[in-house]
Image: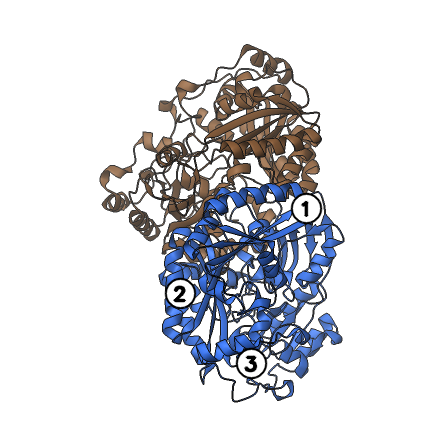
Chain colours: A brown, B blue
Amino acid sequence: MLWSGWGDPAKAAELPAPVRRLLGEALGVREPAVPAATFGEVRLNASTLPPGVLTLLAAVVGADHVRSDDDARIRHTRGKSTPDLLLMRAGDGSDAPDAVVLPGSHQQVVEVLGVCAAHRVAVVPFGGGTSVVGGLVASRRGFAGVVALDLARLNRLVSADPVSMIAEMEPGLRAPQAEQLLAGHGLTLGHFPQSYEYATLGGFAAARSSGQASAGYGRFDDMVAGMTVATPRGTLDLGRAPRSAAGPDLRQVILGSEGAFGVITSLRLRVHRAPSLRVYEGWRFGGFAAGTAAMRRLAQEEAGPTVLRLSDETETMIGLAKPAELGASSESGCLMVAGYEGEPGDVAYRRERAAKALAEAGGVCLGPEPGEAWARGRYSAPYLRDSLLAAGATVETLETACFWSGLPRLYDAVRLALTGSLGSPLVMCHVSHVYATGASLYFTVVTAQAPDPLGQWAAAKRAASEAILRAGGTISHHHGVGRDHREAYAVEIGDLGGEILRGIKERLDPEGILNPGVLIP
Amino acid sequence: MLWSGWGDPAKAAELPAPVRRLLGEALGVREPAVPAATFGEVRLNASTLPPGVLTLLAAVVGADHVRSDDDARIRHTRGKSTPDLLLMRAGDGSDAPDAVVLPGSHQQVVEVLGVCAAHRVAVVPFGGGTSVVGGLVASRRGFAGVVALDLARLNRLVSADPVSMIAEMEPGLRAPQAEQLLAGHGLTLGHFPQSYEYATLGGFAAARSSGQASAGYGRFDDMVAGMTVATPRGTLDLGRAPRSAAGPDLRQVILGSEGAFGVITSLRLRVHRAPSLRVYEGWRFGGFAAGTAAMRRLAQEEAGPTVLRLSDETETMIGLAKPAELGASSESGCLMVAGYEGEPGDVAYRRERAAKALAEAGGVCLGPEPGEAWARGRYSAPYLRDSLLAAGATVETLETACFWSGLPRLYDAVRLALTGSLGSPLVMCHVSHVYATGASLYFTVVTAQAPDPLGQWAAAKRAASEAILRAGGTISHHHGVGRDHREAYAVEIGDLGGEILRGIKERLDPEGILNPGVLIP
């Protein structure tokens, strides 16, 4: 993973000439005066860890698995939000952990937490490092130091149960590794978020990830049948049955806890037979309202595509649903991608039923080409962001969700807030997760970098967050809370919601060493 | 509701002569020597409420809505488990609340909790009074008295949103009232547990109820999009979107909290268009293993009946799936009921697909008659229990769930434990809730009453609970925890699971007045 941007540098996306022209002419984007810092130019603070702590940690995980070199520290600094990237491009490594610890077992995680609790060292659980909400920066206040707990060595498929259709997998597995291991058993998880190529199973669970095929396979939290969690107070083992009436669902307390309650060391996950057929196709709707009405109908009739995604007029015009064709589109209306995965007979039935509903709702089928173009480019948007940042644009995404009847108001409110804050940005939106009762909205914003791009985005983000809260949306449908959404989250759940979280935190992590400053209001 | 048994006394079920003969000959059941106590013979303790508390409560809800007469106290004593009924039949009213308070609004509930917290009065939220796990008996230790908070006056359909397919409803609505109000909008909840005729929406949510059509409409906790909760610390309002990545799902903390964290005063519930067609039919399988394998296939292929239920060989032989024909059956193998509700085209497709899978799995279709017989008798088993108790039998149910691969072992373990404890009881079982990864098991036990029927059942229940825990099942799939399962529940969730609950409790209910002794280990 590129330390200052996304993914494999060899796959860097060159901006097409028409896009560069468009950026300059329509948005006033100019190449930045100062080039991005090189790796060697990143400024790190000296470690503040008390002497002896590294020795104690090495005694638990082995000396090879405790690293405090600059390379390890820089590669575990923050996540992949646009502010994170802007700071790294400016050579700011001030949020680097003092050391990186790589445990090899659940028991080692428990012991590491014990050492850190005893010495007041903050611990940041680290999976793929793909947080876009500041989930990987612990507050140092009151702590002797900060270590990143990198779970990369916990990367086994422990077992696959083809009767219960459950696989036990470790949290450090990146999604493609997990899919490859499951493919050996003819199975799939079906979880394909945009971060797919780098994110880990533990991160999906801790941050309540939702993938592009959520309409078919469900969200990641739907997939978690059971889990083992290491806390500073010991081990928590949850999930004896698919569902239970034995009290609150405690799995749902750990899911979304972003490392603040404990470290997930094992997941029992619902798996599916790998589909023998995948079909993605495009549909055009006259407008966003007509397209969302069609999606709602599909969601409420459970006439289930596996993938369902609708771009608004602007995103359709820019062609963002098909990144390889960015800026080349002269399409009007709104592009919908509907995908079906499964056995041929099942795919045929669902496709026919959905097609009938979509046509009745005013959709025009565009055939497979737009669907396949979407599928080809589905993981490439983060590469595009690096190129746009380098070209002098501020580009970022944000997302929310609400019930269907509130969706038009929420859409308008967020667009208005972004436009009000940024002047005349390009604001694009799509719906990519639908439920019987509501849906998500995912916004992409592009504007010319101001002299202080961090301040520029912070103001826009604040305006958007306030608009989301006022319009009754949730502050995040699938990115999480982290540090960036913590204030808005406190408003969303109210004082007593915060009390619930603090009550749990106090019992599982009395010294407060786990990801301090993240999530808990 | 009959104070000492179930439902409408006019609907009391007469035991057919062959059943009486069977009870006597096969199980040695003899008519009890002592007749059941009459209403007037029930012994109540004097109220321990401090003077002035009733006046304060009356100032909040109105004098007409605070009752401390014997009738109100007896009718709010305990729930409807077999031990509850045995105690009432013995004239034991010692668990009666000191008074019954009927608030008329959310604000009144908040104020009642304030008065009770200030005066250390325990509060038992009371809906339909149908708990079968001792969820309605508060511990008096450390409290000045106990009041039942009857939510019957919170019985409105507040709003129906046909766009989001969400209805806001109050917790005191009994399920048939709720369905009737929704029917006025062409809508249904689709929640039909055996307690349907008396249980309330608030109780369904607080105890994580699951209905007979869970395969089609989901569990009650699946239906809760949002909720308002009154606590001694104020109001909690949860649910801005169908799903969110903004932290743990706090709705899932209140669902299943059994009145120990707060009182649910409003529910935003997912609703469906009322189905235009309902078809229930019977299938016969050679054995329980073959039948459960067929269910698993349907659940994993999502080839969805709305109702799916399989009786084991004993339950099939006794005819318990069709209570009106009890004891008259000479059927062999295992009876499955598969039901489909929806629009005709959809029903036809699902039925055809499921029928193909069931036939391939060795099932023989018996046509609609057994399905319709099940549907006719679906709420009558609790009446039957009253008649069996009166005839001198000990009869009770218990239930659990686990993942598919553990189901055969769990089934054997529970049967063995019950048989070991009770000598030679009749033990029947059915599966009535299926998921992709597992299923529930529901046992009905009939045996001759021992001289101490309470002690007899307590021992059998303890043996069954220990067997469930050892075999890896959950202590309850849909009845809840209450007082009866509290010890087993503590083992199930472990020390840290208990810490989570105590941490939440401490923050929302610092004086511990809410349902003390229930749920929280």
* Residue furthest front as drawn: B330
Image coords of residue B386 (percent x, y): 57, 76
Q: Is residue A168 visible?
A: yes
- Number of numbered discs overlaid on the protein picture: 3
Direction from residue A324 to residue A147 in the image, left or right? left
Residue holding disc 2: B414
Query: Which residue is drawn at the image coordinates 37% and 31% (left, top)?
Result: A75
Q: Nearer the viewer, mark 1 or mark 2?
A: 2
Residue holding disc 3: B390
Chain for numbered disc 3: B
User: On residue B165, which mark appears?
Assistant: 1
Q: Which amino acid, mark 2?
A: Val
Q: Which amino acid, mark 3?
A: Ala
Direction from residue A308 to residue B274 in the image, left or right? right
Q: Nearer the viewer, mark 2 or mark 3?
A: 3
User: Secondary structure under badge 3?
Assistant: helix
Q: CA distance from mark 1 to mark 2?
A: 41 Å
Image coords of residue B477 (percent x, y): 49, 59
| Residue contact between numbered discs 1 and 3, judged by CB atoms under 8 Å | no
User: Secondary structure under badge 1?
Assistant: loop
Chain for numbered disc 2: B
Disc 1 with disc 2 on a shared chain = yes
